[in-house]
Every structure is written in structure tokens, then in C-alpha cells.
Image (tube, grey):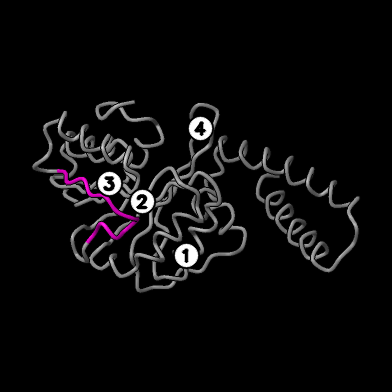
Amino acid sequence: MNSNQLSQRLKAVADFVNKGETVADIGSDHAYLPCYLVKTNKVNRAIAGEIVEGPYQSAVRQVKEDQLTEKIEVRKGNGLTVLSPGEVTTVTIAGMGGPLISDILENGKDRLTGVQKLILQPNISAISIRQWLLNNGWQIKDEKILEEDRKIYEIILAERSENHQSLSQQELLLGPVLLKEKSAVFINKWNHELVQLRNIQKQMEGAEVSPSLSEKKKQLEQKILLIEEAIK
């Protein structure tokens, strides 16, 4: 992978960016995504944010190598603190856990002024992101699921909305758009998840009974039912 040829995962994120948007890529690593977006003339200006020194330096080098220093600014900082309100129209965050992405959004809510679109790619627990979006005035407009190098990734596109979006527990867990499409990758992901959840369920059967265990069993059963209903 490089700034000319993205991974399938990052290409799917890039595909959700429309021409003319101004993008901030948070946790940008090598800044491949913003470099690609500028090179393909999708965006004229981008910000690459990175908190870790090594990836930050890699991003700086990549932007210089691609001769894009006038169009891409690499900034070092934690999450959305690298942004000023109103600077960009679109924020991308890819390759982190869902709870971490949700924390970044929550802690940087004041920096999202002027942002109209979020493109988020969690490695795990997409439900955390969907819940945050619902609670904070964002509407899920599209989703994509894909498999690359034997790993399955979900990408969520959300836009700011005055209309409150209502999602069922099943839609929160599985994704409202993905649930409608039910692609082969989607079925594969949740079949695999079912096997793991049923193994956990078996392990719980032999454990000492307690109120907390009973609650966990109940939650697990509900999750299994939601998945079974979706993929049967």
C-alpha cells in the first residue's frame, strides 16, 4: 500500500469522500489517505492528524515526498484537538476500535463545528460508534462491509441531521444499511461471531451462578437471537 494505491479498506473510506470537500484524517499514520485524496483531485486541501511521534514523522515524510506540503498540513496532537472549529467539512477516522473512535468524537465535539460528514472505520465494536452518532445528532447515511487479508471491516458514513434517527437494537448491532443488504461478507462475519458467542455461552453454563452472571447470560442470549434472526 502507498499513496497511489490504497488498501481496499482505505479505498472504501476514500470512496465516501465527495469532490470539493475539505478533509481531516485523524490517526492518519503515513498520511496515505489524504495524499491519495489530493492526488486524485477529490480534495484541494487536507489535514493529517497523528498523536504518535513515529507515524507523525512518517506522515510528514510522505507529504514531502509527494510534494503536497502546500495542500496537506500534518499536525501532531490528540484526536480532534488538531482541528479548529470550521476548518474542515469532513472527518475520517480509520483503523481504531469503535470505543476509541467514539471517545475521540466525544472529547472533540467542540471541534466538529462546520463538519458535515463523518467517515468512520472501526476495527471492532461498530455498535459503539452507531450509538454515539444517534446520541449526538448524526444520521447514518451509508455503510460498507468488506473482507481484506482475512479480516472484515465496516465503514460508516454519517451526516449531520436535525432529524433524529431511530435504530432498533438489531440495526445498532449489525448496521441499518448492512442489515438491509445482507451481503456474503456480512453473513460470513456474523456466522463467525455466532460460533464465538455460543462458545462463551457454553462456558457460562459451567460457572457459579451470580446476579451479574445471570445478567451477562441474558445479554448474550439477546445478542445471539438478534444475529440468528438477521442471518437465518
Provide residue 214's location: percent of width, then percent of height. Answer: 83, 64
First along the sequence among labels 1 and 4: 1
Depth check: 3 or 176 in front? 3
- Rounded to the nearest angstrom, the CA distance separating label 4 from label 3 is 20 Å
* Residue for point 23% across, 58% down: 89
The local secondary structure at tag 3 comes to loop
Depth check: 48 or 42 in front? 48
* Residue for point 39% across, 73% down: 163
- Rounded to the nearest angstrom, the CA distance separating label 1 from label 2 is 14 Å
Residue ID for mark 4: 147
Q: Amino acid at mark 2?
A: Ile
**Left or right for 178, reference 48:** right
Q: Residues within 10 Å of mark 4 (few under 14, many from 20)?
A: some
Residue ID for mark 3: 17
- Rounded to the nearest angstrom, the CA distance separating label 1 from label 3 is 21 Å
- Is residue 126 a member of the stretch shown in magenta? no
**Left or right for 100, reference 110:** right
Provide residue 29's location: percent of width, then percent of height. Answer: 33, 39
- Is residue 73 a member of the stretch shown in magenta? yes
Question: Which dot marks residue 190?
Answer: none
Provide residue 130's location: percent of width, then percent of height. Answer: 49, 59
Depth check: 160 or 70 in front? 70
The local secondary structure at tag 4 comes to strand
Question: Which dot marks residue 119?
Answer: 2
The local secondary structure at tag 2 comes to strand
| Marks 3,2: beta carbons within 8 A | yes
Provide residue 164's location: percent of width, then percent of height. Answer: 43, 72
Depth check: 97 or 170 in front? 97
The residues colored magenta run 72-83
Would you place residue 12 above or below residue 100 in this image?
above
